[in-house]
Image: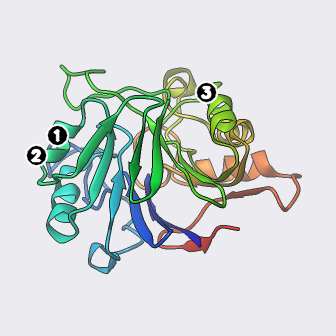
Amino acid sequence: MLRVTFVNHATVLLQTEGLNLLTDPVWSKRVSPVSFAGPRRHRAPGIRFEDLPRIDAILLSHNHYDHLDMPTLRRLAAEHNPAVFCPLGVASLVRRCGLRDVQELDWWQATMWRGQNLHCVPAQHFSARTPFDRNHTLWCGWVMEAERGNIYFAGDTGFGQFFGEIGRRFAPIRLALLPIGAYEPEWFMGPVHMTPEQAVKARELAGAATAVGIHFGTFSLADDGEADPLARLRRALAGRDTTDRFWTLAEGEGREIP
């Protein structure tokens, strides 16, 4: 069984092989260095923190505040004490949240965890938490091997040919979580965030049987409107075969993946 539940933004609950994993968990009201300013949440998380099942592991893509939220990580450490997998340079920050089982990997490195192979894979983005630490740490996506098809979390990324390489190395990909928002203005955001049309192309390059759109509609991070990514994705998919599974889910909506 593989079930995906969209919490919102880049936070997704993955349930497979008797394990519960969260991607880039954020339950805070704002994503910034301070609690009284910065991008504010427009939609409540689709799962209340108190209603989470036991969380076994967290997959972190990079250190931006809308992806690595220290207050949420502290709560997860206190309530669940999960394992954490993160890119190079991020482990020290994660351990400051009280999490102890932390592994950081470079691109194309892998680790075995509870019988599952987890692979750190490339993304096209950047990292920073202050004006003085840009690109001091790595950013990445993750692939989790599974018997019926692999699971790919792309993290936060612009479009690149590396999607094809990931698809070649990890075929078959059963599920891909692909960002579709925060792309306007495209001349500025294009190197680090995909458009919905590019996400459709990334899904094709990766050869994913099912894709789920993430990274939209929760925080105002760019000039595209709250509903713009969904509208553009619908247009990009118009006229395609109905079996072409690129889904967007409402907050709290879960589906089993074929």
Q: Residue at x 53, y 29 (%)?
A: 185
Q: Secondary structure at mark 1?
A: helix
| Disc 2: which residue | 96
Q: Residue at x 38, y 73 (%)?
A: 47
| Disc 1: which residue | 93
Location of the C terminus by quadrant is: bottom right
Asked if one can make out residue 64 in the rendered structure from this viewpoint, the answer is no
Kind of residue at badge 1:
Leu
User: Disc 3 vs disc 1: Cβ atoms closer than 8 Å?
Assistant: no
Q: Residue at x 73, y 43 (%)?
A: 207
Residue 131 in percent (x, y) is at: 20, 22
Q: Is residue 175 above or below residue 189?
A: below
Residue sitting nearer the eye, 62 or 258: 258
Residue 62 lies in what quarter of the image? top left
Q: In terms of sequence position, does the residue under pointer 3 or pointer 1 come before the other?
A: 1
| Disc 3: which residue | 162
Q: Is residue 58 left or right of residue 132?
A: right
User: Disc 1 vs disc 2: Cβ atoms closer than 8 Å?
Assistant: yes
Kind of residue at badge 2:
Arg
Residue 90 lies in what quarter of the image? top left
